[in-house]
Image: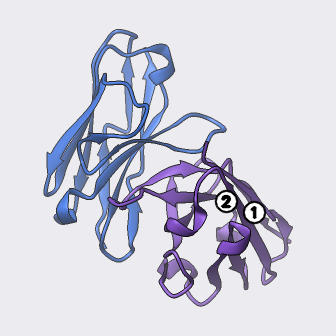
Chain colours: A blue, B purple
Amino acid sequence: EIVLTQSPGTLSLSPGDRATLSCRASQNVRSSYLAWYQQKPGQPPRLLIYGASSRATGIPDRFSASGFGTDFTLTINRLEPEDFAVYYCQQFGTSPLYTFGQGTKLEIK
Amino acid sequence: QAHLVESGGGLVKPGGSLRLSCAASGFTFSEYYMGWIRQAPGKGLEWVSYIGTRNSVTNIADSVKGRFTISRDNAKNSLFLQMDSLRAEDTAVYYCARELAIFGAAFDIWGQGTMVTVAS
């Protein structure tokens, strides 16, 4: 089973800052099948990134992502107040079919 | 606009059963793989099950294997999760979600979720 470890657990930043979130896999993630989601309290997750670096429909370009193999990064430039949320990475491809990281909480400093 | 609405959650005793439903609208349901993902209170996301465009392709997490069954009715644009032998650790919000077309490997449309509470 591939385990995804996200860091930091909590990130405290101010609007206008840049956020860098990390997701490390215990084994290579197949064909960059790595996705990122944003979740706000009381809401379902929202897909931000798929294929390690492709933005989903309607996602602003201040969200970007990169990585391959075992190390992946989500970067959010010029943080807006609505960006403060919990972020999850997710991999697809090995048993279990999908696994999620434990999440990084992005909070206002 | 694609939309998913879950129903069927509630309070059930350990060992009991529930059948969750997910009604899809705004897209051609029969052309998409679908999944169920759950989130225990205050916890992270856990993938539960996945089904292809027909009932012939399914996959399920080890934590619920032998107890949960996923199915779909394309004629009714509906996805189901039959949950038997429920345990306290199955308590969670259950989301149905649509897998990305073509690329796959991620879920681009999510319902609002339905709460399942397993307690005596």
Does residue B77 lie above or below A78 as drawn? below
Does residue B56 lie above or below A8 as drawn? below
Q: Could you tell whether A81 is left or right of A15 in the image?
A: right
Q: Residue under circle 2?
A: B92
Q: Mark 2 lies on which chain?
A: B
Does residue B71 lie above or below A93 as drawn? below
How crowded is the residue under tag 2: few (<14 C-alpha within 10 Å), some, or many (20+)? many
Q: Which residue is drawn at 81% across and 81% down?
A: B16
| Marks 1 and 2 close (CB-CB < 8 Å) | yes
Q: Quarter of the image containing the C terminus of chain B?
A: bottom right
Q: What element carries label 1?
A: strand
x, y percentage for residue B25? 68, 53
Does residue A42 lie above or below B35 as drawn? above
Q: Residue under circle 1?
A: B116
Q: Which of marks 1 and 2 is nearer the N terminus?
A: 2
Q: Quarter of the image containing the N terminus of chain B?
A: top right
Q: Could you tell whether A95 is left or right of A58 in the image?
A: left
Q: Foreground: A67 or B104? A: B104
Q: How many marks?
A: 2
Q: Which amino acid does label 2 sit on?
A: Ala
x, y percentage for residue A47? 44, 43
Q: What element carries label 2?
A: strand
Among the 4 quarters of the image, the one containing residue B79: bottom right
Residue B21, numbered label: none
Give the Cα distance between marks 1 and 2: 5 Å
x, y percentage for residue A51? 26, 51
